[in-house]
Amino acid sequence: MKAKITITLKNGVLDPQGAAIENALAGLGFDGAAGVRQGKVIELKLAETDEGAARAKVEEMCQKLLANPVMENYAIEILA
């Protein structure tokens, strides 16, 4: 199985990279882009064959290493 984890900053957490991207877009003439937030996507393969077990394992990975639950949200997608 494969897992896809999308990690974003929680609302209210400053996002200097998002602000830099927003400014760069405006500098390139892309007006109207506002509220830019930057995040990351992690994809990995799992040896698990049961979707529930795979999701539980990825949840534990996120809690222990992949995301900072204090300042980041994450969404897990299990792919066949």
Image: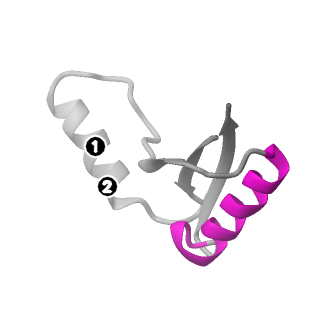
| Relative to 2, 42 lies left or right | left
Which label was assigned to residue 21? 1
- In the rendered image, the residue lying farthest to the left is 28
Q: Position of residue 41 (x, y in %)?
A: 47, 46
Q: Nearer the viewer, residue 70 or 37?
A: 70
Q: Quadrant of residue 26?
A: top left
Q: Which residue does the numbered mark 2 point to in the structure image?
A: 17
Bin the neighbour count of mark 2 within 10 Å (Cα to Cα): few under 14, some 14-19, many 20 and up. few
Q: Which residues are magenta?
A: 50-68
- The one nearer the camera, 37 or 74, is 74
Q: Is residue 63 magenta?
A: yes
Q: Quadrant of the C terminus?
A: top right
The residue shown at (42%, 41%) is: 36
Question: Relative to residue 64, is residue 34 depicted above or below?
Answer: above
User: Which amino acid, by three-letter code, is at mark 2?
Assistant: Gln
> Can you give x and y, in whole percent of width and height, for residue 35 in the image?
47, 41
On the rendered structure, is 71 left or right of 77? left
Q: Which of 10/57 is in front?
A: 57
Q: Secondary structure at mark 2?
A: helix
Mark 1 lies on a secondary structure that is helix
Residue type beneath disc 1: Ile
**What's the distance in space between the residues labelled 1 and 2, CA to CA?**
6 Å
Q: Position of residue 50 (x, y in %)?
A: 80, 46
Rendered residue at 67%/48% (across/down): 75
Q: State yes or no: discs 1 and 2 in contact (Cβ < 8 Å).
A: yes
Quarter of the rendering occupied by the N terminus? top right
In magenta segment, residue 73: no
Give the prevailing secondary structure in the magenta stretch. helix
| Residue 7 x/y as whole percent | 54, 53
The residue under the point 66% across, 59% down is 58
